[in-house]
Image: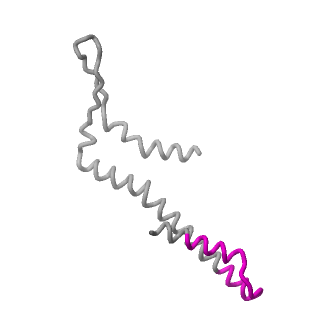
Amino acid sequence: MLPAVLLAVIINAPRFFESNVDYIPDGEGDFRTVLKVTRLRLHPTYMKVSNWGRALLIRIIPFLLIAGLSLYLFIATRRMAIGSDKVQHRRTDSDVLGCIYYVRVRTLIN
């Protein structure tokens, strides 16, 4: 769990420098809180790197890992089912698992 927390902190650390909180006196002795965007957040290079980096780390890589590993499990399960069908000449639990993994991969792709 510690590596996941550290990775989350590292990925989100720059976001703490994207804005500032300012307190403006309103004339009655109270302060009004204003959230201001920093120059870092408005920099075009930072915006591109931040958006593409987050998309890659949070969306694309996890999707490819899940789809690839599910496809690997499906293929391995089908191979086991084919091998057991030659010996037993009947459907096995691995056929059912293979179908489940196939549906899972198709769901992820669509």
Compare residues 101 and 64 and report the one nearer the observer. Answer: 101
Q: Seen from this angle, which residue lies furthest top? A: 29
62 vs 16, left or right, is: right
The residue at 28%/27% (across/down) is: 34
Q: In this view, does 25 lie above or below 103?
A: above
Compare residues 91 and 23 and report the one nearer the observer. Answer: 91
Residue 95 belongs to magenta span: yes
The total number of labels drawn is 0
The x, y position of residue 95, in whole percent, is: 67, 77
6 vs 95, left or right, is: left
Q: In which quarter of the image is the C terminus?
A: bottom left
Compare residues 80 and 26 and report the one nearer the observer. Answer: 26
Q: What stretch is highlighted in magenta?
A: 79-103
The residue at 37%/54% (across/down) is: 53
Q: Quadrant of residue 13?
A: top left
Q: In this view, does 69 lie above or below 56?
A: below
15 vs 41, left or right, is: right
The x, y position of residue 22, in whole percent, is: 28, 25
Q: In this view, does 96 lie above or below 53?
A: below
The x, y position of residue 1, in whole percent, is: 59, 45
